[in-house]
Image (spheres, grey):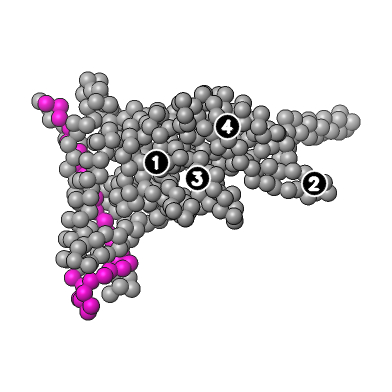
Amino acid sequence: MIRKSFLITLCLFTFFLASCWDQNLLVDKKMVNGISLDLDKDNTILATVRALNIENKGGGQFEVKDELVKIKNSNVAGMAIDINNKLPGQIDVSKAHIILIGSELAKKGIYPFLEVFYRPRQASPSTRIVIAEDKASDIISLDPGTSPIAFEILKGLEAAEETTKIPKETVFSAWNQITDEGRDMVLPYVKKDENDKITIGGIDLFDGDRFSGISLPDEKGSLLLLMMDQITKYSEIAINLGKNRSISFRAKDIKRNLDLKIDKKTSKITCKLNLNLDLTITSYSGKVGEKLNKDKLNKEISQFLTKQANEITNSLLEANCDAFGIGRRISSSHQTLWKKLNWKKDYKDVKFKTSVKAKIDRTGPVF
């Protein structure tokens, strides 16, 4: 009985000892909630950090301050050291909500910067990766007055993700796509308007880890995601049909078919992409008293979206962005051909044939 009691006591002692070992106290940390990276003069890197400084005031009271720190360095590893020197306490980047990268730096390649956030053992799988249309530091330095700017940007991203305006891309998902030879990623970009408000601009097209310099605006970005067979709650798109006629609709149900045809003699690759959309009309501006002609509207919407889809595939080829993962399909199903290809050079020779068919399923409150 004495031996049993001793063993129980020993186990409890070991448990409590383990729970305190290497303990990281919240008040000893600087919680980084957002960080921006830019290409500065002389090819140095400008890192702008938003960190929550949690101070213990005693008696169970804490004061939280949103601090802003700017660091310049010529290499990524040196940045982390400089940030620690400027912010007293242990820096914890694992809880960062967003990493905002300036477009000029993104054109140089984002792989080295993602590694800093991907490698740590406590890295957060939900940290968003976003591109800034211009200087990322100009955005992260804004003070919205209500909550830290990183939280405001995150809320905007989450809302746009739910309506399939932008992809949900984290450090982890971006890293996996960069290291995937047969597919390229697309990332959301944000911009600042004349009133210092942050808006979702659309989608940037990447060639490997480099921003190609080619972007798709809001509506085309939504259609690209549907062509990639990605949809969250729904996708909402507005188009102009001409002659003071415009229409907006929601797509909840989609059917995407992507088929590759490879010429045995020439090895030419043709990608046939067919997209079928079931739509709910949310608004329509036509003639007063005009009666709804579903067949006519279906045809007009289909023609408009097919034209846009062709423009999107042209942009993908121009950007050398294999967003559909055609290379991955070839590498798995046509291994002999894949070994002969230099995909970075040969992707631009892919021929796309796209078709979008719209079917109005519901008219909602419009008719």
> Which mark is on residue 57?
2
Q: Nearer the viewer, mark 3 or mark 1?
A: 3
Is residue 300 in the magenta section? Answer: no
Tell me which segment is drawn in magenta: 266-293
The numbered mark, 1 or 4, whose residue comes first in the sequence reads: 4
> In 3D space, how far apart are the residues under numbered discs 3 and 2 (Cα atoms)?
31 Å
> Which mark is on residue 187?
1
- Viewport quadrant of the N terminus: top right
Whether 44 is drawn above or below 244: the answer is above
Horizontal side, residue 270 vs residue 215: left or right: left
Q: Nearer the viewer, mark 2 or mark 4?
A: 4
Q: Secondary structure at mark 4?
A: strand
| Amino acid type of the residue tagged 1 in the rendering | Leu
> Which mark is on residue 139?
3
Image coords of residue 89 (percent x, y) = 70, 34
Q: Nearer the viewer, mark 3 or mark 2?
A: 3
The numbered mark, 2 or 4, whose residue comes first in the sequence reads: 2
Q: Secondary structure at mark 2?
A: strand
| Amino acid type of the residue tagged 3 in the rendering | Ile
Using the image as rendered, state which of residue 96 and residue 3 is in the foreground. Answer: 96
Count of number-bearing discs: 4
| Residue bearing mark 4 | 71
The residue located at (16%, 60%) in the rendering is 299
